[in-house]
Image (spheres, rainbow, N blue to C red):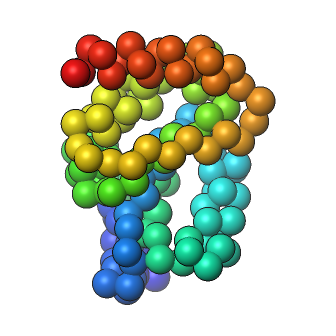
């Protein structure tokens, strides 16, 4: 499809009012795809351009593309699952701290039972380090 160009979706970019960057653990890819489907089924969600790393192309500098998409988004969505809480993930090490440097609205999508208190404590510590 010509509307998909490697690192983002160009199709009717002008009709989208917001860009949502979704940060998640690879093990949760199937759930993330279902989440995106639900977002776009909702009336308000149809105006949101969603980006997640499934759009990465081989041969590109992954971190450069990820940061470019993250920096260009108004919304930062973090997918809360046990995988995110239990590991020292790229989301916690790189994406979340980067999101703090911009004026982004943070959204947590809890897709499974997970220890929100532990994650919140970790995220607060990261925010204090950045701040």
Residue at 61%, 61% (x, y): give it: 36
Q: Where is residue 11 in the image (x, y as percent from the top left)?
A: 39, 83
121 vs 129, left or right, is: right
Residue 48 in the image, given as x and y percentages of width and height: 46, 70
- Please determine whether, in this image, residue 54 is positioned above or below residue 28: below
**Is residue 55 something that shows in the picture?**
no
Q: Where is residue 4 in the image (x, y as percent from the top left)?
A: 40, 74
Q: Where is residue 46 in the image (x, y as percent from the top left)?
A: 54, 77
87 over 23 or under it: above or below:
above
Q: Which is more toward the observer, 91 or 44?
A: 44
Is residue 15 found left or right of 27 in the rendered image? left
- In the picture as drawn, the residue positioned furthest to the right comes out as 113
**Residue found 40% across the figure and 54% down from its top:** 75
Q: Foreground residue, 127 or 83?
A: 127
Picture residue at 69% right of the left edge, 50% below the top: 30
Residue 66 visible in the snapshot? yes
Question: From the image, which quarter does the C terminus lie in?
Answer: top left
Left or right placement of residue 26 versus residue 71 in this view: right
Q: Camera-side residue: 125 or 33?
A: 125
Measuring 56% from the left and 74% from the top, which residue is drawn there? 44
């Amino acid at each position: 499809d010509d509307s998909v160009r490697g690192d983002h979706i160009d199709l009717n970019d002008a009709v989208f009012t917001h860009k949502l960057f979704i940060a998640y653990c690879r093990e949760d890819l199937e759930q993330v795809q279902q989440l995106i489907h639900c977002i776009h089924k909702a009336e308000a969600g149809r105006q949101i351009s969603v980006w997640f790393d499934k759009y990465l192309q081989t041969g590109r500098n992954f971190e450069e593309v990820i940061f470019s998409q993250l920096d260009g988004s108004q919304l930062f969505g973090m997918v809360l699952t046990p995988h995110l809480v239990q590991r020292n993930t790229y989301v916690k090490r790189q994406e979340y701290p980067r999101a703090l440097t911009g004026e982004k609205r943070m959204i947590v999508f809890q897709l499974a039972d997970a220890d929100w208190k532990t994650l919140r404590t970790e995220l607060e510590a990261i925010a204090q380090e950045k701040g």
